[in-house]
Amino acid sequence: MTQSSLALARDIKRPTREAMLQRAPSVQHFWNDNTNLFENAWKEWEQTEDIDGVTLDETNFAPALRAAVDAAWNDPTDDAAVKDLWDEVFPGVYKAQFFDPEKLRILRGYMDKAANADIPLRPPYGISLNRAGAMLDPRSEGYLGAPGFQAFYHGLMNRYMRPGEGFSGSGGSFIDPEARRVESLKFDPGVALIHHGSVPHASEPITEGSRSNFVLWLYGQHGQVARGEAEVPALAPEDRWTVPNVPSDGFAPF
């Protein structure tokens, strides 16, 4: 009897943590050689898994953000409301309510079920950070390939990112080298921080409870990023509120 893709993926022998830490060539081969198997396994999982009617869509985002983004897409010259939602809380670091705190249980529930699917997932940087982690983008091997999640993820990236759970501790420290100032910023449920990668920063330890993060990196073709000291070009609203129509180069930074 032929095993299903889901069963094969769950039974496959996985790389050891030592091999992942050493970035052994066999680990890269493992992900590359099983790309199709894992993609098919995620499709089967989503069709058969009881996910309690979970729907990942734009209703998971904060209502104010959703309304402002909708208005900007309808009229690109009307995007001031999006900018007004973001407060500069540290030089070069901006904060806004991104997810609806009332809907976080839906997103968290789905991600918990995906983590427990027993389908191999490649963690960020190729090694396990904190207790868990997974790559989300199809350009990264071993990504979370469930079709429903991918539709949600691409909607988030294309429509939002291109242009109440209890925990304590686990803030983010940001450093201003010129002012010689360090400030700890608290992560509230559903709140997003956006900053240039050149802003020195570090995570602080969780002292109680748990926290889950979506970490999203924005970059151009071939991994190009603007340098922190570079002048940011002024874009017309019509250019900000567009989805790139050029084929992806398939570059993945991690």
Image (cartoon, grey):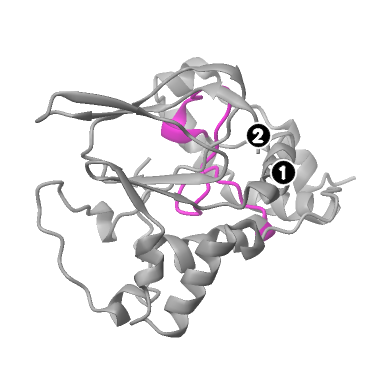
Residue at the spot of label 2? 165
Please tell me how crowded label 2 is: few (under 14), some (14-19), or many (20+) other residues with Cα within 10 Å: some
- CB within 8 Å, label 2 to label 1: yes
Three-letter amino acid code at the position of disc 2: Glu
Residue 16: tell me if it is visible. yes
Whichever of callouts 2 and 1 sits on the residue coming sooner in the sequence is: 1
Does the magenta run of residues contain 128? yes
**Residue lying farthest bottom?**
75
Three-letter amino acid code at the position of disc 1: Arg
Q: Position of residue 40 (x, y in %)?
A: 69, 53
- Identified at 12% across, 29% down, the residue is 179
Residue 155: tell me if it is visible. no
Give the overall secondary structure of the magenta segment: loop
Q: Position of residue 26 (x, y in %)?
A: 47, 29
Q: Of helix, strand and loop, which one carries label 1?
A: helix
- Identified at 69% across, 32% down, the residue is 12
Range shown magenta: 123-148
Residue at the spot of label 1? 105
Q: Of helix, strand and loop, which one carries label 2?
A: loop
Check the picture and name the quadrant holding the N terminus: top right
Residue 117 left/right relative to 49: left
